[in-house]
Image (cartoon, rainbow, N blue to C red):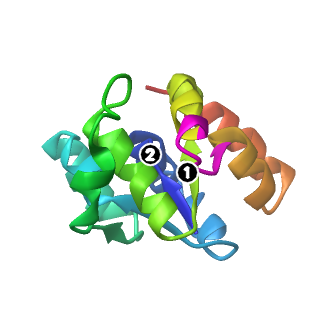
Amino acid sequence: MFIINDIELLVRLGKHKLLQSILTRCAMAISALKFSQYSFSIQKEFDAYVKVPIMDCDGEFMQWYQGKGEIASVGDLSSMFVAQQNSGILVLSHEENPLMVVATRYGISHIGFDDFIFQNATDDRMIQFYNLIKQVA
């Protein structure tokens, strides 16, 4: 299972109909705590375009979180925790590169969003379209 940390990029994939194809090839989820950090408008778009499970952190998160908030936000750490608890892989966009160091420090498997797309894209046109979408803010 892949745990997506950049929800805005995930919404753009959903809005442009690339997400459906990826979901046929792999399982994805997001952290409920990370999701709660996004604006209401992004949350509404998520509901409209993205059909990915939102996973809660269990009671062990607070214990795991202790002393880890020096670089990463609580939401980012919750994504890492969800990935670890579900033997998943954390997917980080290029804006989140500093989080790769944190994930490595805590033994969280991770992959860049670009590599995730390259692994799960069904054709070259999809990769080209993704490259256009990720540039749009």
State the residue at coordinates (26%, 53%).
63
Name the outermost residue toward the left.
40
User: Closer to us: mark 1 or mark 2?
Assistant: 1
Q: Residues within 10 Å of mark 1 (few under 14, many from 20)?
A: many
* Occupied quadrant, residue 23: bottom right
State the residue at coordinates (28%, 57%).
61
What element does badge 2 sit on? Answer: loop
Q: Residues within 10 Å of mark 2 (few under 14, many from 20)?
A: many
Label placed on residue 90: 1
Are circles 1 and 2 on residues that touch, CB within 8 Å? Answer: yes
What is the magenta range?
A: 104-111
What element does badge 1 sit on? Answer: strand
Label placed on residue 5: 2
Q: Amino acid at mark 1?
A: Leu
Horizontal side of 43 relative to 137 (left or right) equals left
Instruction: Please indicate, yes or no, whether residue 45 appears anywhere in the rendered image.
Output: no
Q: Earlier in the sequence, mark 1 or mark 2?
A: 2
